[in-house]
Amino acid sequence: MFGLKGDWSLDVKERYFTLQDYSGAEPRWCTGCGDHGILAAVHRVCRDSQIKPEKTVAVSGIGCSSRLPHYMNTYGFHGLHGRALPVACGVKSRRPDLDVWVATGDGDCFSIGAAHWIHAMRYNMDITLLVFDNGIYGLTKKQTSPTTPMDVPTNTHPSGALLPPLNPLTVTLGVTNISFVAQIVDWNAPLRHEVIMKAHQHKGTSFVRIIQRCPVYVEAIGKSLQDEPARMKLLTHEKGIQLDDGVKRLFPNHAEHDPSDLHAARELAEDSSALPLGILYHNPDAPRYDMMTSVGMEMSVDDRLAGMNEALDHFAI
Amino acid sequence: MSTRLDLSKLSLMDALDLAKLIEMEACHRYQMFASQLGRSGGYDAGAFFSTMVENEAKHGQEIEARRKALFGDAPARLTLDDLFDVEAPDMGAPRRGMSTVQAFEIGLAAEKKAYDFYDMALPGITDPDVRELFTELRDEEMEHVDMLREAMAKLPSSASAEAELDLDETPAL
Ligand SMILES: Cc1ncc(C[n+]2csc(CCOP(=O)(O)OP(=O)(O)O)c2C)c(N)n1
Ligand code: SF4
Ligand SMILES: [Mg+2]
């Protein structure tokens, strides 16, 4: 071609995305907040999967945790309190080509957003749903959330919550058509990475409850678990996650758990003696609503109008 | 802590590059902690993290000099993307208002983590030069642990004091 040097090439080079390509604004979470580690894991999973930033959307509601889309160099939607999931489902149903992530909190998802949580789980659209559960309303400065333990004083309940906390795992595992349920703690990087990676690879709604440290308002929740690792049970399996011995060493309690066994998953979730960590349930074959809502997406506007007119004609008198 | 590399296949040059990157990753992380915490005067947690920035940078430069002497400017095949919190403490490790002693504990755990990394990698490494290098690096990490322990023992009792948190600094919409 005229003007091009002999050693020039017009081959389109394959793009390689680094962590920097997924990093947005500088995080404004408190120093020591568990959200920093979760964000780092999301960046890493995006990088390791080489998903295109321009094909990725991070959706959230309102809360400290819901600030995540600002820290992603992707598309984002910082929505309304409790409404992350309806927005995410809307995005996925109209743009099934996009990689949709949801960041929500225990207040955002389990309290004001509870109805959307149940239905989104049943819709089973291909969404990676990360619930940052710090057991408190963080952004509004320390009010009781549905998962606040009874012995933790808050500004709304200075003598501690009046009712026992909701168990997000048993609730999720009770919903029809669920396909992926996992639990992790924010402070174990390899576990965090493995589970979020598997959640992202899963085609369907991947529910990951993350026990997240809020050292400012409820330090005791994360600290008591860190100080007593025997209160957690690490679940590994060839169909779930497998971790190095170095990681397993940190958890005195571990068990082999086949994540295709829903009954066993429910038993683990109900066992109050140990908090299960890893993948509790995985069913890659559950029907996905986004596969149904996207039927006919390729039709032109004219074809759609013609189809609608034809349908309406049935009612013409 | 991990890398996605097959460590048994590392050449000496790759191993030196990896060791340098491990120090760089830790150096960047401490830099982030130091800037998050700032300085409130005296030898506080922020000051400790700043010292660690210098220590890790120095160790990285030493490794880099060795690599250069042996392999010149041959392009490195590894990047920071190939590793993952090997010596760098976890992102969420520091806390605003934390004491100097607590900051030291983070540094101590990170050095131990680096020791474990080399120690666990060693049995799988067959190249004698890489083995020698990893053994040396592992032992250096243990020296760093001892150095930190010694320095910790000399800290005044005020180094255990935690500062009050300013709740207005938590996020807002
Ligand atoms: C409709 C509505 N109700 C209440 C609020 C006030 N509000 C903002 S964030 C929040 C709770 C956030 O808690 P959570 O979802 O657990 O997030 P965290 O800050 O703990 O990460 C509340 C009640 C709001 N913004 N909108
Ligand atoms: S208030 Fe708690 S949850 Fe919110 S950023 Fe600070 S530590 Fe994190
Ligand atoms: Mg919360």
Image (cartoon, helix red, strand yellow):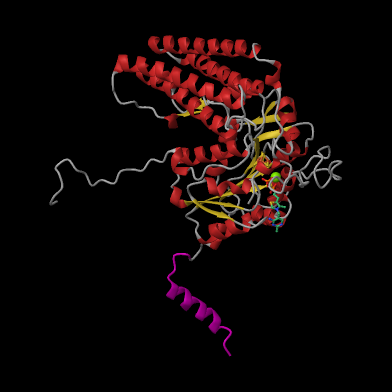
Q: In terms of depth relative to the viewer, which is nearer, A128 or B151? A: B151
Q: For the point 45% across and 25% down, which residue is it?
A: B24
Position above or below: A179 against B93: below
Q: Residue A189: x percent and y percent?
A: 58, 31
Q: Assess whether residue B24 is covered by the magenta stretch.
A: no
Q: In terms of depth relative to the viewer, which is nearer, A110 or A217? A: A217
Ligand 3 is found in the corner quadrant, namely top right
Q: Is residue A126 left or right of residue A219?
A: left
Q: Residue A285: x percent and y percent?
A: 58, 48
Q: In terms of depth relative to the viewer, which is nearer, A95 or B154? A: B154
Is residue B10 visible to us here?
A: no
Q: Residue A46: x percent and y percent?
A: 49, 42
Position above or below: A119 against A173: below
Name which quarter of the figure residue A236 lies in.
Answer: top right
Q: Quadrant of the C terminus of chain A?
A: bottom right
Position above or below: A234 against A316: above
Q: What stretch is highlighted in magenta?
A: A297-317
Name which quarter of the figure residue A35 lies in.
Answer: top right
Is residue A85 visible to us here?
A: yes
**Secondary structure that dominates the magenta span:** helix
Question: How many labels, in total?
Answer: 0
Q: Residue B140: x percent and y percent?
A: 50, 11
Q: For the point 19% across and 43% down, which residue is it?
A: A8
Residue furthest front in the image: B41
Q: For the point 52% across and 14% down, which residue is it?
A: B141
Q: For the point 60% across and 57% down, which residue is it?
A: A79
